[in-house]
Image (cartoon, rainbow, N blue to C red):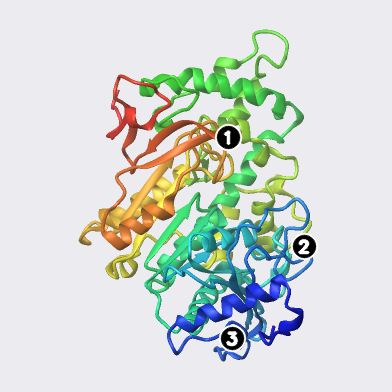
Amino acid sequence: MSLRLNLVGLNLVGFLMLSAAISFSAAPASAATCESLASLSLPNTTVTLAQLVPAGEFNPPAPAGRAGGRGRGGPSYKDLPAFCRVLATSKPTSDSEIGIEVWMPAENWNGKFEGTANGNWAGNIGEPALAAALRRGYASAATDTGHQGGNGAEFSVGHPEKLIDFQYRGIHEMTVQGKAIVNAFYGEGLKYSYFVGCSTGGKQALKEAQRFPADYEAIIAGDPANYTTHMAIQQVGVALAVHKDEASDIPAEKYPLIHKAALDACDALDGVKDGVIENPMRCKFDPKVLECKGEDSNSCLTAPQVEAARKIYAAAKNSRTGKEIFPGLEPGSEMGWAGLTTKDAFGYAMNWLIYGVFKDPKWDYKTLNFDSDVTLSEKAGGDAEDANDPNIKPFISRGGKLLMYHGWADPLIAPRNTVEYYQAVLAKLDSVKNVRDSVKLFMVPGMLHCAGGDGPNTFDTLTALEQWRENGKGPEKIVASHMTDGVADRTRPLCPFPQVATYKGSGSTDQAENFTCAAPSRN
């Protein structure tokens, strides 16, 4: 878009664009105009659009567009400041076509770069994450990871390079090319680069720390799907347990019954009865307490339903050796069980097994073998699909900070897997100086998958990360809020694992200041 304006017919949009262009006059002499970035030369990458977007004027692309627009009913962008929007396509291999989008504040840039993440099977650009970063003064980048549509893995059939783009190369290309675009626009180097992601994005975050330690100074990894080759077995195993036969099926109407029983058994273990299980690792709930004494009803579980519920809580294990494959869900997660107990089995897991492992669209999950199929999944994933390598010494040695979090009530990705990864990192790098000051895990009581739930689940990890990396002040706690109709009705500190929020004994239990972080009780 040209900035040569007809001043006689100048409209509001033109005025805003001119004002933004004039503001660049104070920038370093080597800074570029937004439109000039269209001719920027980047390795294996072509800029397809460089456009100055006036304040409040961003209009998301249509849903069918490359950038995965939100369409009607999506988030509002009227509060966004003026920014330079750049679209690019990276082709690191002959079968790659990685879409990249970069947003850069026209004014008041904070000097930092934020890499944003994806969910599910990626396949689109996340404008809400870009917008959130822009509002904080960040230049930010997003990617579709090399394919269109995020509901499945069909794109990988016959395209192994596209699968690699999804697994890790797309995020790395977004980072490298995104930084180059930012540097060209502002004409000065970045102060800090951060990556923020949850779920698939949490896996992408850990992959960056493990495989590309120089990409970011600090990383946030939430509810990470980082052990796909094993996680898929457990997730499909839940559907198998519930739909083994008609008698095992647990109707959704019974989930509140099970949830209440779990709370009755374990809510008060932390000394505060608040509808949230603070530390499910202490909970010994057995759904057998709900077994029907007479006929089946919505106030009890039949014997087959009790057994199915037990399997949901239990770790998936190798049927031959008994070795754990992946942890089970925790007490407190019951209200979200519908995600894994669907009759068609969980879509993310099914896509990995159908297209990544068996390469057969007709594969029936009821044939799942908890021995041989685990081996097949591991072989298909190699070192690309999973992000569970605990050796992140190169990242830490550069001063990198890794902040992980996971909702204890996550009904999709078993939260204990993140605990196990954190513990594996500490065990692997125990001899590395300051490792415990470089990697921290915050477990979130009552939070579902990445957000929502009965517990305080709204919190700011990015500010904590900034203070940690920039000022050397590691977070001793992160205050979280529970919101009802936009109003905080409870706050509570999130504590570095293995510490838990402990009530001081006086004051409202809905206020964070009345809690302290302490080692969990051994009682």
> Disc number at residue 37?
3
Please name the amino acid that badge 2 sits on: Pro
**N-term mark: 3 or 2:** 3
Q: Which callout, 1 or 2, points to the residue nearer the camera?
A: 2
Residue bearing the label numbered 1: 312
Secondary structure under the numbered disc 3 in the rendered image: helix
Side (left or right) of 511 relative to 408:
left
Viewer-closest of 41 and 232 = 41
On the image, the x and y values in percent for residue 79 come to: 61, 57
Residue 460 position (above or below residue 208): above
Q: Depth check: 74 or 158 in front?
A: 74
Q: Give SS at disc 2.
A: loop
What residue does disc 2 label? 63
| Disc 2 packing (10 Å; few <14; some 14–19; many ≥20) | some
**Where does residue 49 sit, x and y in percent of width and height?**
67, 81
Q: CA distance from mark 1 to mark 2?
A: 36 Å
Question: Please, what is the three-letter code of the amino acid marked with disc 3?
Answer: Leu
* Residue 143 visible: yes
